[in-house]
Amino acid sequence: MARIVIIGAGMSGLAAASRLATLGHRVTVCEAGGTYGGMVGRYERDGFAFDTGPGLLALPAVYRDLALKTGKEPLEELVDLAPVDPESRHLFPDGTCVTLPNASRGGVSQALDEAFGAGSGARWSAVMNHGRTVWEATRRPLLEEPLPADRKFLGTDPYPVPARHGLARLRRPHPWSLEHVAARELDSHPGLSALLFEPAVRYGFTPAEAPAGATVLPYMEQSFGVWYVRGGLRALADAVFRRCELRKVGFRFDTPVTRVVVEGGRAVGVETADGRIDADLVVSAMDAAALRRHGLVEWPGAPSGVGEPQEVPGRFGVLLALRGPRPAGTAHRTVVHAADPAEEANALTLAVPPCGRPTVQVLRPDDPALRPDDGHESVVLTATVPAQGDVDWTAPGVADHYADRLLAHVDAAGLGLRERVLWRVVRTPEDTRRETGALGGSVARPVLAGSSGWWLKPANESPVPGLYLVGGNAHPGGGLARVGMSACITAGLIGPS
């Protein structure tokens, strides 16, 4: 039985703790804040409740596996999990509306033909078939297995680029981006291009920097479905925390770790304000860059990808408490697409003001647990924006002014929310930074094949013996499913007691 200290009680820390305790280790979790869940937060007021982080779950198989491996009950006995149907409703600047079914590629193709004309669904399906090729090539090395020592293959995008002909064969091939995919395979169709770009923008990638392999993101959502946990995603954090308690994991809240103790070249515990905690192994769910930046640990050299640049975009959210019932037939997830995609991309990459009419995700769950009664509705708006640093979100009036612009943008698309607002709460990247320690409040991106090595996440086994890394800024990257995968990979590396 090894003594293991885990730094951070976010979802990756909870998942790692429950798995390692099940393997027979004695696990203690130190959390700087007063509660668990990390990004999977919750805000409650006047009978309304809101997810302050992710609101939907992709690849629930990750948490099904966690539930089965750490106890006898399947995930569906721990939380009320249901597919979202329709998966999403999309509103475009020209007034076009497309409603996409959940986990039905045939249904998506039919919906696109009806909205954009015959042949649109076939073109989209061809791109999604290429996304399947990326998925099959990268699923194991990028999601299920430890990061290999030789990582050159990560710079090779498995997206099947069409063969070149004529004089083009003599030129050195240039890696394709999502922009190239949209131009070459979707004829730059505004609606189809916006659908292709939206999942990448959600993670803070612009179409020009996201590799063609980012087509795997919409492929995964449309093939495996999108799911909702009744009561909000916070209920999933509650379930994993209860599993940790069942496995006798010890928790120390309001206990920030001030240093990882390294003796004889090996991690042997942590220092906290309450004193030293000795351990045989340390697992950090903190941002790996923050570990080094704040002097919590020193290791030789600078591992590739140990920290992303601070200008990585963040998320801006508006929590809306609305008077009046949720309209019949309202989609759980509506996406109001950017009025000017080029302006949005510039705002995410250049030192310019945030895009006034960006891509906005509107979550409107039909969940009585999130509202005081059926005469009210809770709604969350989310947009990807420059992180704290590029924009001073704490400056007086900046956040509220931007929230006004988002509301005007979605209402111009026909949602009619502003006139129903009882009150609202605005959340900026600075809130994310303060609550989770993410540098600049930035989005934790997934690892994508073909990405520049600059975005490569550090391996789960750090250069310091005895120190392991999990979470959105460790392999395989950000997103609720991926942080669960990082915990699974790390538990496999450590093994049973």
Image (cartoon, grey):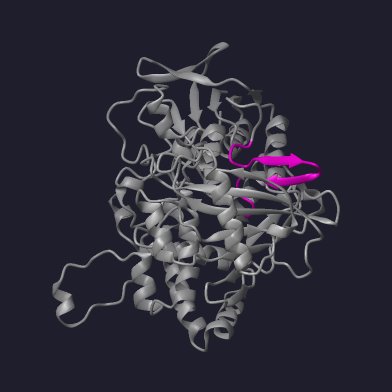
Extreme residue toward the bottom, this view: 118
Residue 2 visible from this viewpoint: no
Q: Residue at x 40, y 54 (%)?
A: 347
Above or below 26: residue 408: below
Residue 227 lies, in percent from the top left, at: 66, 58
Is residue 54 something one can see in this rendering? yes
Q: Is residue 22 above or below residue 101?
A: above
Residue 43, image quadrant: top right
Q: Can you tell which quarter of the image residue 109 is in?
A: bottom right
Q: Residue 49 magenta-drawn?
A: yes
- The residue that appears at 18% across and 77% down in the rendered structure is 168
Position above or below: 116 against 274: below
Query: Where residue 303 appears, x then y in whole percent?
Result: 31, 35
Report the side of 297 relative to 228 (left or right). Answer: left
Along the viewing direction, whichever of 104 and 330 lies nearer the viewer: 330
Quadrant of image for the C terminus: top right
Q: Which residues are magenta?
A: 37-56
Q: Main secondary structure of the magenta part?
A: loop
Viewer-side residue, 172 vs 62: 172
In the rendered image, residue 455 lying in the magenta stretch gets the answer: no
Query: Residue 213 location, x and y as percent?
Result: 39, 63
Q: In the drawing, does residue 174 fall left or right of residue 154? A: left
- Total marks shown come to 0
Give the image quarter of residue 27. top right
